[in-house]
Image: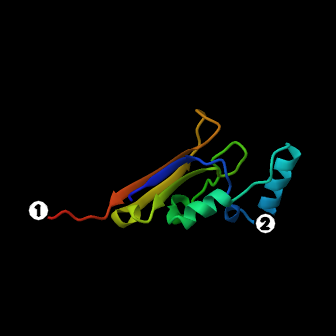
Amino acid sequence: ELQVWVGDFNTLTEADYNEQEWDNIVKQRVENGRQHPCSKVPTEIKKMGFSDCWEMAQRPNPRSTSKFNTRVDYIYCSSEFLTTWNLEKFWHHPSQASDHNLVFAQFVTNIVISE
């Protein structure tokens, strides 16, 4: 099916961070009485055949989408969607409207319509 999943998934992807950054995130969460970060949700979504648009766009800066300087907001596309649509542009945009940055993806169709 042609699917795009967008939102605040409240999860981190460990591969987004180097070892020192990940250790700092774990330390900060423990100090604040929160659970260790978990990467199960992104891993399962990718196993289902979805692609992370931020990764497809070569991980543009800024990486962070939350006030904790972490990425918890994602746009995932199904492999079927990507047979019809190409990711043209992707970006995170800082916003004062929320404690999260806005996440944008712009797609173009790869279907050629002949007259």
Can residue 58 be seen here?
no
Q: Which mark is residue 41?
A: none
In the image, 30 versus 2, the foreground residue is: 2
- 51 relative to 12 in the view: left or right: left
In the image, 35 versus 63, the foreground residue is: 35
In the image, 69 versus 29, the foreground residue is: 29
Secondary structure found at label 1: loop
Label 2 neighbourhood size at 10 Å, few (<14), some (14-19), many (20+)? few
Quarter of the picture containing the N terminus is bottom left
**Three-letter code, disc 2:** Glu
Can residue 63 be seen here?
yes
Mark pair 1, 2: CA separation: 54 Å
Question: In this rendering, is residue 69 above or below 44?
Answer: above
Colour setting: rainbow
**Three-letter code, disc 1:** Glu
Q: Which residue position is annotated with label 2?
A: 19
Q: Position of residue 51 (x, y in %)?
A: 51, 63
Q: Position of residue 52 (x, y in %)?
A: 54, 61
Secondary structure found at label 2: helix
Quarter of the picture containing the C terminus is bottom left
Q: Position of residue 82 (x, y in %)?
A: 40, 64
Q: Which residue position is annotated with label 1?
A: 115
Looking at the image, the residue that sits furthest to the top is 97
Q: Position of residue 12 (x, y in %)?
A: 68, 55
Residue shown at the point (56%, 52%) measured from the top left: 74
Callout count: 2
Question: In this rendering, is residue 23 above or below 97?
Answer: below
Name the N-terminal-most of marks 1 and 2: 2
Looking at the image, the residue that sits furthest to the right is 31
Label 1 neighbourhood size at 10 Å, few (<14), some (14-19), many (20+)? few
Question: In this rendering, is residue 80 above or below 9?
Answer: below
